[in-house]
């Protein structure tokens, strides 16, 4: 399998007054094309911090992140922004949909923000909303959608640019058990049918146990709880 991304000896510290907080202390992690990797850990273990570093939303204190064997530290800010916009999809716990726009417009947003015309984005947005089961909700604004439907819109938006990897931070954390299970089934189906690569932060051990690999963060280090095939 081809390697999508890799973290090498990743360290992240924060200075809080006179204290230095070491959140990550040398995390090693690889994610391969078409793989589902789950990351768990107690509150404050650094799960979201790790996802933000991988998503280029923050910089590590030391260590290296490689995207398709390309070290990000050697790239310009413009080149990193391009990777984030084109190659990384984000799904968050609280959806982050724009309330004044319809489901279709929210799905188009990654392209609209880069100057694309709506007419050029419509067919792709329609395709994705149908894929996530919202063919009859395309013109609805978020206020008229349930939590599960809003998360489906967020997943469709994350897929718009056909990213190399989708980073999902507690994607079922704001949903009831039944709705959350529906979102989990959708993500797994997308992985199976479209070989979408998923890196999922979750506190749900049932969800984590279903992943191809399960990594547990403890005391700033990554520990394998379930191993998958690499190569």
Image (cartoon, grey):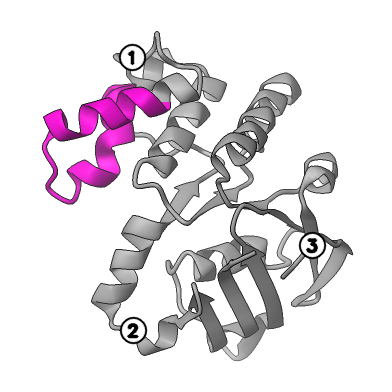
> Reading the chain from its start, which is encountered first: label 3 or label 1?
1
Residue 75: image tag: 2
Residue stretch in magenta? 99-128
Q: Predominant secondary structure in magenta?
A: helix
Quadrant where the image shows the C terminus = bottom right
Verify CB contact (< 8 Å) between mark 3 and mark 1: no
Verify CB contact (< 8 Å) between mark 2 and mark 3: no
> Reading the chain from its start, which is encountered first: label 2 or label 3?
2
- Callout 1: 10 Å neighbours few (<14), some, many (20+)? some
Residue toward you, 69 or 47 = 69
Give yes or no for residue 108 being in the magenta stretch.
Answer: yes
Going 66% across and 38% down the picture, which residue do you hit?
173
Give the side of residue 124 with respect to residue 201, left or right: left
- Callout 2: 10 Å neighbours few (<14), some, many (20+)? few
> Reading the chain from its start, which is encountered first: label 2 or label 1?
2
Q: Position of residue 160 (x, y in %)?
A: 36, 41
Give the side of residue 5 with respect to residue 71, left or right: right
Q: Position of residue 158 (x, y in %)?
A: 43, 43
184 vs 3: above or below: above
Q: Is residue 98 visible?
A: no
Going 79% across and 48% down the picture, which residue do you hit?
208
Q: Nearer the viewer, mark 3 or mark 1?
A: 3
CA separation in Å, label 2 and label 1: 40 Å
Furthest-right residue in this view: 225
Q: Position of residue 87 (x, y in %)?
A: 40, 59
- Callout 3: 10 Å neighbours few (<14), some, many (20+)? few
Q: Is residue 185 visible?
A: yes
Give yes or no for residue 170 being in the magenta stretch.
Answer: no
Mark 1 = which residue?
A: 140
CA separation in Å, label 3 and label 1: 42 Å
Mark 3 = which residue?
A: 229
Quadrant where the image shows the N terminus = bottom right
């Amino acid at each position: 399998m081809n390697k999508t991304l890799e973290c090498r000896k990743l360290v992240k510290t924060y200075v809080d007054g006179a204290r230095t907080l070491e959140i990550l202390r040398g995390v090693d992690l690889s994610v391969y094309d078409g793989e589902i990797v789950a990351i768990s850990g107690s509150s404050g273990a650094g799960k979201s911090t790790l996802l933000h570093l991988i998503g280029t939303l923050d910089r590590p204190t030391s260590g290296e992140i490689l995207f398709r064997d390309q070290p990000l530290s050697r790239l310009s800010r413009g080149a990193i922004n391009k990777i984030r916009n084109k190659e990384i999809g984000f799904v968050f716990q609280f959806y982050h949909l724009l309330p004044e726009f319809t489901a279709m417009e929210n799905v188009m947003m990654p392209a609209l923000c880069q100057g694309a015309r709506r007419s050029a984005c419509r067919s792709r947005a329609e395709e994705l909303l149908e894929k996530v089961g919202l063919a009859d909700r395309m013109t609805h604004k978020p206020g008229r959608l349930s939590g599960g439907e809003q998360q489906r819109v967020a997943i469709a938006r994350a897929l718009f640019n056909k990213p190399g990897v989708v980073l999902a931070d507690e994607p079922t954390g704001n949903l009831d058990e039944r709705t959350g299970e529906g979102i989990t089934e959708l993500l797994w189906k997308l992985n199976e049918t479209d070989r979408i690569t998923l890196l999922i932060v979750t506190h749900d051990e049932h969800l984590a146990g279903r992943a191809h690999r399960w990594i547990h963060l403890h005391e700033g280090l990554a520990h394998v709880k379930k191993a998958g095939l690499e190569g």
